[in-house]
Image (spheres, rainbow, N blue to C red):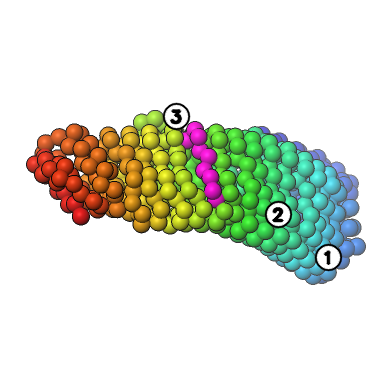
């Protein structure tokens, strides 16, 4: 991209030098085009057409269309490459066309053009960044030829646009994708993109968005956030394997599937998804990137207010810092069978119907607190050896006995920690309480 930019500037300087070298310099400059062309004020369509014919050529690198009051259409047919294109606050502009534009080296933005309905950039192949902001009437924009995007892609507050399709965008996007607050947007599809480098994907507040598909994306250096897309039903990130953080909230997704996701280094937050019934994260196993294996566990998890989910199961995950699960009305079963624990780990779980928990590989943690409105019939903490507080409420008697037996076996003398168990207690439980207190634990049975 830099080489293309420098070549463009050198060509511009070379052409300008020879254009001024003889007595016919004025006509030569006009045929080669002006460096910066501005459309503003009370300019009419006819006047704009003359400027396009006379002033745009190979030397033209900047186009500014701003604060016009009468301009309704503009066809920039002579423009093939540009350093900057800015289209801002034009009161009556409805259509703007770039039929031959192939590359934009820096800024390419359309902001606050309240009448703009159509942007034609069918042949645009490469851009540093693209921004569409507050285009209340924009209905149509085509990105069919766009292959390379080296900066930020933004479509925000464009109330009439119905689809964002990038069929040929490939390789790497070296910044973020932001698609927010588009009132009539129904579909987003980016079919060939493989990587987001030094950036994130943020898709939120699109009130009738139903489908998001980025099916070949393998890695995001930053985060993926899908928030407040209140009727979103279908997502496809089936190739995604590596990401820093994932947030999905306030959607209508029923099955949340990330079949290839293995590495998560930041946080996982899933909340307020009214129709969610199933998680599918079959390969998620690490919360530190595979090329930084010595970094300590970084991830935190929150799974909150998903009323239809009945089971949470991360079969390959092996570490955590914080895990918070609450207000999932139908949740009964929680399985994190390979998590080994962390000396600063904090697990807090509460719910109305939780009966089964499997944390069979957890050895160390700071806090483990579980509260259920029904009796817990199965709790596997068979490897627990070192902790700050272990507090479980509403356990059946056999599970109280089993847990205390495991702790008596696992805990060494002079341990420090606190155990608080609520449920039916037996003589065996009372005997184990005394044994654990002899080893240094504080034990309360209620």
Residue at 29% from the left image edge and 39% from the top image edge: 381
Return the residue nearer the eye: 128 or 226.
226
Q: Which residues are magenta?
A: 276-284
> Of marks 3 and 1, which one's residue comes earlier in the chain?
1
Residue at 70% from the left image edge and 50% from the top image edge: 187
How many numbered marks have been drawn onto this rendered protein structure?
3
> Of marks 1 and 2, which one's residue comes earlier in the chain?
1
In contact (CB < 8 Å): disc 3 and disc 1: no
- Main structural element of the magenta stretch: helix, strand or loop? loop
Crowding at dot 3, Cα within 10 Å, few <14 / some 14-19 / many 20+, comes out as: few
Quarter that holds the N terminus:
top right
Q: Is residue 86 visible?
A: no
Crowding at dot 2, Cα within 10 Å, few <14 / some 14-19 / many 20+, comes out as: some
* Comparing labels 3 and 2, the label whose residue is closer to the camera: 2
> Of marks 3 and 2, which one's residue comes earlier in the chain?
2
Secondary structure state at the residue bearing disc 1: loop
Q: Position of residue 249 (x, y in %)?
A: 53, 54
Q: Is residue 415 visible?
A: yes
Residue that numbered label 1 is attached to:
71
Instruction: Please say whether residue 377 is one of the residues in the magenta stretch.
Output: no
Q: Position of residue 345 (x, y in %)?
A: 31, 44
Residue that numbered label 3 is attached to:
291
Horizontal placement of 378 versus 18: left or right?
Answer: left
Q: CA distance from mark 1 to mark 2?
A: 31 Å
Label ID, residue 186: 2
Toward which corner of the image does residue 155 lie, by quadrant?
bottom right
Q: Position of residue 154 (x, y in %)?
A: 64, 52
Toward which corner of the image does residue 119 lie, by quadrant?
bottom right
Horizontal placement of 328 versus 199: left or right?
Answer: left
């Amino acid at each position: 991209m830099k080489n293309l930019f420098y070549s463009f500037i050198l060509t511009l300087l070379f052409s300008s030098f020879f254009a001024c070298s003889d007595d016919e310099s004025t006509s030569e400059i006009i045929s080669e085009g002006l460096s910066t062309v501005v459309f503003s004020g009370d300019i009419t369509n006819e006047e704009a057409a003359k400027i396009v014919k006379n002033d745009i050529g190979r030397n033209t690198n900047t186009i500014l269309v701003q604060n016009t009051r009468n301009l309704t259409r503009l066809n920039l047919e002579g423009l093939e490459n540009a350093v900057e294109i800015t289209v801002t606050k034009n009161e009556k502009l409805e259509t703007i066309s770039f039929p031959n534009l192939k590359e934009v080296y820096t800024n390419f933005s359309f902001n606050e053009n309240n009448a703009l309905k159509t942007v034609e950039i069918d042949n645009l192949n490469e851009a540093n960044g693209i921004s569409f902001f507050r285009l209340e009437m924009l209905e149509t924009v085509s990105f069919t030829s766009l292959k390379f995007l080296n900066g930020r892609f933004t479509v925000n507050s464009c109330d009439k646009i119905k689809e964002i399709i990038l069929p040929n965008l490939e390789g790497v996007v070296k910044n973020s994708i932001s698609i927010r607050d588009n009132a009539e947007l129904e579909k987003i599809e980016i079919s060939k993109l493989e990587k987001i480098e030094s950036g994130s994907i943020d898709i939120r507040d699109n009130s009738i968005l139903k489908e998001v598909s980025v099916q070949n994306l393998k890695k995001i250096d930053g985060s993926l956030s899908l928030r407040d897309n209140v009727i979103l039903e279908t997502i496809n990130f089936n190739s995604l394997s590596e990401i820093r953080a994932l947030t999905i909230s306030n959607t209508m997704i029923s099955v949340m599937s990330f079949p290839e996701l293995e590495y998560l280094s930041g946080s996982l937050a899933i909340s307020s998804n009214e129709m969610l019934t199933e998680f599918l994260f079959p390969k998620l196993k690490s919360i530190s990137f595979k090329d930084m294996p010595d970094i300590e566990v970084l991830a935190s998890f929150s799974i909150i207010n998903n009323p239809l989910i009945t089971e949470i199961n991360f079969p390959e995950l092996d570490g955590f810092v914080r895990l918070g699960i609450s207000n999932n009305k139908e949740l009964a079963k929680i399985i994190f069978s390979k998590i080994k624990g962390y000396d600063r780990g904090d697990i807090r779980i509460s719910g109305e119907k939780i009966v089964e928990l499997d944390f069979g590989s957890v050895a160390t943690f700071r806090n483990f607190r579980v509260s259920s409105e029904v009796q817990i019939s199965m709790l596997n903490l068979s490897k627990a050896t070192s902790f700050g507080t272990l507090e479980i409420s509403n356990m059946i008697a056999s599970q109280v006995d089993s847990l205390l037996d495991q702790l008596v076996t696992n805990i060494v003398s002079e341990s420090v920690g606190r155990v608080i168990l609520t449920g039916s207690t037996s003589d065996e439980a009372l005997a184990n309480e005394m044994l654990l207190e002899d080893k240094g634990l504080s034990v309360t049975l209620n």
